[in-house]
Image (tube, rainbow, N blue to C red):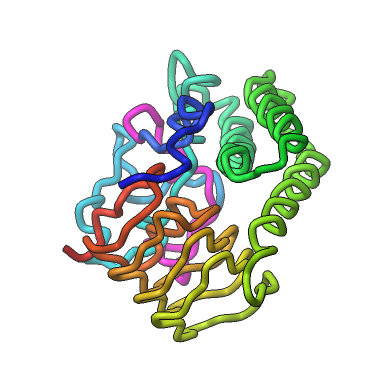
């Protein structure tokens, strides 16, 4: 499978945004607020370990998550924030051995998650834009992001990311507009497409950013440079669908959708193990 996104100067950085639970200390299973209605085992307050988190920070029921229909656990992806937080701020231990600072560590994990998510979009944005004047702006934002991730514990635990997020959103909006400009009928972001039947439609360059697309049917659609930035794709049917040239997709979106072995995906993402053969 080929993909323009493969030829990125940020390939090494992109690898850091892929989860590696072996190098983490179960932060997502502790730091996050979870609810049963969102597909997690139980209602859980932030800072409270999941009842299935083992002493080695592995999930006791990981192999049975699909059978129990814990869609929240199956879909979740931290953009590599778990291992990055553990490596940078817990090099000699875990949150358990740093109990006096565990609240701060959990806040750091959330901050790194948000920064990594924006970094994921920025690295892709760099490959997508044809505006040579915009590329230096993206490079500066990527550099600024990396600097923020490596701040001292006190600074990164209590960050104000609002200004930075505005700058990132401005760039992403500019690129989204650039890409969708040639579409026959542009989509307005944030629309409700709940259960929409798009079967075999030509959706090339359409902008579905921030749209509600739960249980939508994309089977047989043309999706070249279709923008899914922030779209809710839970239970969307992407079986036998080519998403390899779609843009601003994340691992979490794929994990929450329904695909199969014939679903083609962007080269920087992984095929969920729960998809049908």
- Side of 82 where 277 appears, left or right: left
Residue at position x 75%, y 44% in the image: 165
Quarter occupied by residue 25: top left
Residue at position x 53%, y 43% in the image: 31
Residue 26 within the segment the image draws in magenta: yes
- Side of 65 where 23 appears, left or right: right
Give the vertical position of 198 relative to 245 (above or below): below
Residue at position x 73%, y 27% in the image: 140
Rendered location of residue 145, percent (x, y):
67, 30
Give the vertical position of 196 relative to 177 (above or below): below
Span of residues in magenta: 21-44
Give the vertical position of 94 relative to 19 (above or below): above
Residue at position x 66%, y 30% in the image: 142
Rendered location of residue 26, percent (x, y):
40, 37
Residue 104 within the segment the image draws in magenta: no
Q: Which residue lies furthest to the left in this view?
A: 277
Rendered location of residue 112, percent (x, y):
60, 35
Identify which residue, 139 or 48, lies in the foreground: 139
The C terminus, quarter of image = bottom left
Give the vertical position of 42 relative to 51 (above or below): below
- Side of 205 where 142 appears, left or right: right
Rendered location of residue 75, percent (x, y):
40, 57
């Amino acid at each position: 499978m080929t993909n323009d996104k493969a030829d990125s100067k940020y390939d090494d950085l992109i690898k850091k945004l892929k989860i590696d639970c072996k190098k983490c200390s179960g932060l997502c299973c502790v730091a996050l607020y979870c609810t049963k209605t969102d597909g997690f085992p139980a209602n859980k307050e932030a800072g409270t370990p999941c009842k299935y988190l083992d002493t080695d920070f592995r999930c006791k029921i990981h192999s049975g998550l699909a059978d129990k229909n814990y869609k929240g656990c199956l879909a979740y992806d931290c953009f590599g924030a778990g291992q990055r937080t553990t490596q940078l701020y817990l090099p000699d231990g875990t949150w358990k051995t740093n109990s006096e600072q565990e609240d701060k560590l959990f806040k750091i994990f959330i901050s790194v998650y948000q920064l990594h998510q924006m970094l994921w979009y920025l690295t892709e944005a760099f490959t997508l834009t044809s505006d040579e004047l915009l590329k230096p702006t993206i490079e500066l934002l990527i550099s600024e992001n990396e600097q923020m991730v490596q701040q001292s514990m006190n600074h990164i635990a209590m960050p104000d990311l609002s200004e930075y997020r505005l700058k990132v959103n401005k760039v992403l909006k500019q690129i989204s507009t650039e890409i969708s400009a040639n579409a026959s009928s542009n989509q307005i972001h944030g629309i409700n497409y709940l259960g929409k039947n798009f079967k075999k439609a030509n959706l090339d360059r359409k902008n579905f950013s921030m749209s509600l697309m739960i249980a939508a049917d994309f089977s047989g659609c043309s999706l070249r440079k279709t923008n899914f930035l922030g779209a809710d794709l839970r239970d969307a049917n992407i079986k036998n669908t080519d998403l390899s040239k779609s843009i601003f997709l994340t691992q979490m979106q794929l994990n929450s959708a329904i695909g199969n072995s014939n679903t083609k995906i962007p080269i920087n993402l992984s095929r969920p193990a729960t998809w049908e053969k």
